[in-house]
Image: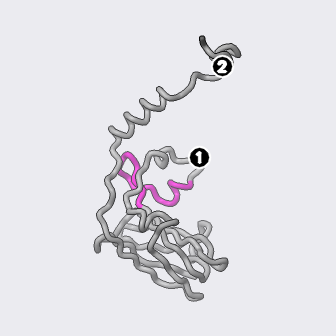
Amino acid sequence: MPVIGTVRLDGQPLSGAVVVFLPVDELGKVAQSDTDEDGKYALRFAGFPGGTTPGKYRVGISYLISRKGEPIGVSGRGSLPPNPEVAHAKELVAPRYSDLGRTELTAVVSPEGGTFDFDLKGPLLPAPTAESEGESTSASTERDLPPPPSTLTPESSTTPEG
């Protein structure tokens, strides 16, 4: 069934967000979509247009921003190989909308589909910065990693130093 709508944040279209419908009963099917420049979305089920099946849904709206300041949409989140930007991206929409376990947003899709508009209240959470996250991530990663396995000898890996 076709499911469409608009996502707004404080009355303004939210472009580049991801809308996810998660079923709460056995009738529904997971469906998702990106929002366009006008905040409009049209759900897709398993990558195909057409919305989703009738049922009750929890709705999550996510605005994941990369360290470069760019939104990461559906295709960027589920790409193979994995998009390395996703690991360092930050969710800017409050968990009451973005966390599927805590979202306040719901929808009941009828056999005809429907239009579901969502008006989120802001502000957005702070965006990531390339400088601060890049420095802390690379420094801690290099410092915290154990030596490569080829440098460990049986004595150094099993015998305590005295």
Badge 1 local density, few (<14 within 10 Å), some, or many (20+)?
Answer: few
To which residue does mark 2 refer? 157
Spot occupied by residue 55 in the image (x, y as percentages of width and height): 59, 82
Percent coordinates x, y for residue 63 in the rendering: 41, 60
Which quadrant is the N terminus positioned in?
bottom right
Q: Which mark is residue 144?
A: none
Residue 71 in the image: above or below residue 45: above
Secondary structure beneath label 1: loop
Is 19 above or below relative to 4?
above
Distance of label 1 from label 2 (alpha carbons): 34 Å
- Give the residue pinned by disc 1: 81
Q: Is residue 129 left or right of residue 77?
A: left
Q: What stretch is highlighted in magenta?
A: 63-78
Q: Which residue lies furthest to the right in this view?
A: 154
Q: Where residue 82 sits: x, y (%)?
A: 56, 47
Q: Quadrant of residue 44?
A: bottom right
Q: Is the magenta stretch mostly helix, strand or loop?
A: loop
Tell me, yes or no, whether the highlighted magenta stretch contains residue 66.
yes
- Label 2 CA crowd tier, 10 Å (few <14, some 14–19, many 20+): few
Q: Point out the image quarter for the C terminus.
A: top right
- Examine the rendered structure and indicate whether residue 140 appears above or below residue 98: above
Give the mark count: 2
- Labels 1 & 2 near each other (Cβ < 8 A): no
